[in-house]
Amino acid sequence: MAPLEIKTYKIQTDKLKKSDRPVRAVLLSDLHDQLWGTGQDQLLQAIDGLSPDLVLCAGDMVLSKKRRGMDHALLLFRELIKRQLPVYACNGNHESRMRECEGDRKREYIYYTKQLQQMGVQLLINESCMAKIGSARFKIHGYEMPMEYYKKFCMRSYGTKDLYMKLGRPDKSPFHILLAHNPVYFRTYARWGADLTVSGHLHGGLIRIPGIGGLVTPQVKLFPKYDRGLYEINGRYMAVSPGLGGHTVPIRICNPPQVFGIIIKGTREDGTVGKD
């Protein structure tokens, strides 16, 4: 595995006041039960260095093709909770696949989710919750995309209907964070109303070509548009983690695993109301 990269991106929003302290988030995705040093110390040191107010996990923290491929992921979650950090997580395709299996794999999924709940991790499966950091209000949504969108060679169109059905229509005032594992449909997430979407899944395109970007997606689509980094459409953002682990074809060329920091800064003057 390549050395761990640490990178921080900044975004601005008029849903937070200019006088508010900037909110610092860490995005983790696609760990695939990778162990980063004894007790996850390499990864935890990187997270500590970003001084986060909250941790957002965009799915595939486990490995569904390996029996009990979750021990290192649970270790990481346990250490984050010990730091008294609020941790929010959604399912990726690996967690969803485990749940849909029969027998041992389904039982392991049930064990995994119970462990997260007992620790205090907010696992959001087509659910939403409110969070307050300082005087800033956030609504955090965890979206689980239907599994057919993860099939090889999938080219299906995707509108907002499933999001509205599962998560409703976002109201105006809070800053909306959407945990959605698959970044391919950023325009749909933005149209639904996510101020910030956090995703992973594409592993940065596996092989990155300088000046072009990632080469291929897990759905075998060449040159994905949203594969790694921060993107913006009309004031709405998507942060795409290139992941922290690998599986099946563990190739990374010019594409290091990354701890992804996000600083959210308010621009609204006190006493004014943010735009919808």
Image (cartoon, rainbow, N blue to C red):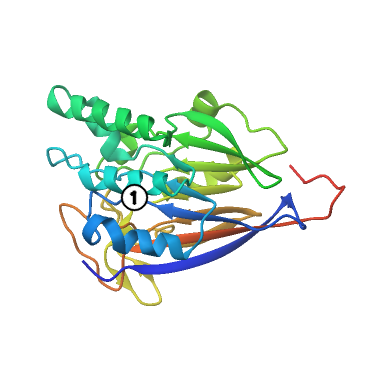
Residue occupying the point 27% across, 62% down: 206
Visible residue check, residue 207: yes
Identify the image quadrant of the N terminus.
bottom left
Q: Is 157 situated above or below 213?
A: above
Which part of the image, by quadrant, shows the C terminus? Answer: top right
Residue shown at 34% from the left, 43% from the top: 78
Query: Which residue extends farthest bottom?
Result: 210
Determine the residue positioned at 16% across, 57% down. 249
**Image quadrant assignment for residue 47:** bottom left
Q: Is residue 38 left or right of residue 225?
A: left
**Residue underneath mark 1:** 201
Residue 239 placed where, x, y %? 49, 55
Amino acid carrying label 1: it is His
Q: Quadrant of residue 68?
A: top left
From the viewer's perspective, tell me whether residue 35 is left or right of residue 21. Answer: left
Asked if residue 228 can be seen in this view, the reply is no
Q: Residue furthest right?
A: 271
Q: x and y percent of residue 10 in the render?
A: 59, 64
Q: Is residue 26 left or right of residue 245?
A: right
Residue 133 lies left or right of residue 56; in this view the side is: right
Residue 97 at x, y = what percent? 24, 33
Q: Position of residue 39 (x, y in %)?
A: 25, 55
Occupied quadrant, residue 40 = bottom left
Nearer the observer, 108 or 200: 108
Position of residue 112 relative to residue 40, above or below, is above
Secondary structure state at the residue bearing disc 1: loop
Viewer-side residue, 270 vs 64: 270
Q: How many dots with numbers?
A: 1
Q: Residues within 10 Å of mark 1 (few under 14, many from 20)?
A: many
Which residue: 24% across, 66% down? 252
